[in-house]
Structures are given as structure tokens and as C-alpha cells.
Image: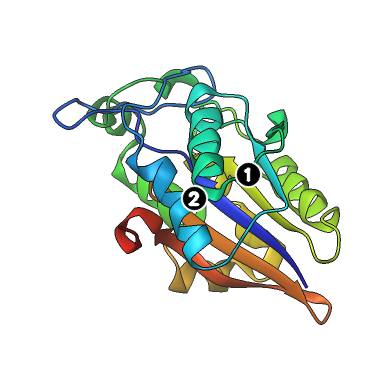
Amino acid sequence: MKRLIIARHGNTFAPGETPTRVGAKTDLPLVEETRGRGIGKYLKQKNLIPTKIVAAPLKRTMKTAELAAEELGYSKKIEICADFTEIDYGPDENKTEDVVIARIGQQAIDLWNEKAIVPEGWKVDPNQIIETWKKFAEQIADNETVLLVSSNGVIRFAPYIVGDYDEFCKTHDIKVATGAVCVLEFESGKWTCSEWNTKAFKFVD
């Protein structure tokens, strides 16, 4: 058995603020700690204790990893992996959703959220991201549990690890919420998904 736990960072916009499409070039800090701490509390509660914590090198992902590590009592250094930095939204980077929809249309947003089909103008190489996920999963050692903190645009390609992506999309929301947890497990020669988009902060005190 080996395990890959994937978590999305916490909130970067406070209640009442108008969110924008935050990608790799917009390095916002967290505005709260609840969701990051919720990840750590939830994993501890479920006895899903990481032997390694990895985070993308953005303020929001690093801080979320640090908060989760504190709650887990994880004392080792958090590893930084630029391969899982958020995607580049191109001309839509840091724009409000109404502006983005005005440029590319609602259907393009729906296809991105339902099947990870990249809208025109976004600087995304799906094949590269998919191979990065697969390679990372392959390198996890037996009996190892890795927690990786990344962002929404990148995480939606992780299910390619478990096989038929189209089938996965039919039964799961690939747009992972802030502070949510996904659990992939490798046993008997194959990867399976035991949890996807679990809003960890809702299940802890």
C-alpha cells in the first residue's frame, strides 16, 4: 500500500471580496487559517498521517501546507515542488469571472470545470501536467503516504493516475474546493480514489 493525499490551498479572498481567477502569476497569501488547519485535523482524525509533505512554491500553497503540518505534528521540512504550481490563465489571469466569461463564454468555463478542456488563450499543457502526476505517483515508495498541496487548475488532472478520466468526470466534481482533500491509494498493482473533494474543515472541530 502507498498513498497520495492531494489538498487544495485555503482561501485567498475574504468574505465580501470579489474573487478573481488566480493562477501561477498571482501569488496571493491566505486570508484565513481554518481550511489549512482543517486539512491537518482531518487527516489526523482519519489516521492518514503523511510521511512526507510537498507543496507548490506559492504563498497560498506553502502556508496551507505549514498549517496542516502544525496540526499533524509534522516536524520534517516541507518539500517544495514547482511542478505543481498553478496553471497560467493567460489573458484571464487575475480577472473577475464576469470578465473571463465575456471573453471566452460560459460553455468554455463549463467544459473546463467538467472535463478539464482548456479554454483558448490559457497557457496550459494538459499532457505535461498529466505525465507529471503519473510520474510523481510512481515515485512514491511502498508504505509511504505523501501529502501534496497544490491548486485547483493543476489538481483536476490528478485523476488520470487512476485510469479512465472521462468516467471519473461523470461521477466526480473535478473542481476541487479550497481546503478540500483527495485520497488516492495504490494496492494490488493499481491506483484507486477513496476520497475526492472532501471538504475537510467541515468534518473537524
Q: Is residue 154 above or below residue 17?
A: below
Q: Can you say whether 202 is above or below 97 in the image?
A: below
What is the crowding at mark 1: few (fewer than 14 residues within 10 Å), some, or many (at least 20)? some
Badge 2 density bin: few <14, some 14–19, many ≥20, Cα 10 Å: many
The answer to whether the residue labelled 2 contacts the one labelled 1, judged by CB atoms less than 8 Å apart, is: yes
Residue 129, percent across and down? 69, 43
Badge 2 or badge 1: first in the primary sequence: 2
Query: What secondary structure is found at the residue carrying circle 2?
Result: helix
Residue 110 placed where, x, y %? 36, 51
Kindly identify the residue that appears in the image at 80 percent across and 66 percent down. 143
Instruction: Give whichever of 123, 18 is nearer the camera.
Output: 18
**At which x and y percent is residue 108?**
39, 44
Question: Of helix, strand and loop, which one carries label 1?
Answer: loop
Tell me the kind of residue under disc 1: Tyr
Using residue 57 as the reference point, say whether residue 23 is left or right of it.
left
Q: Which residue is mark 1?
A: 74
Quadrant including the C terminus: bottom left
For residue 61, side relative to residue 124 (left or right): left
Q: Which residue is mark 2?
A: 40
Residue 100 lies left or right of residue 15; in this view the side is right
Q: Quadrant of residue 77?
A: top right
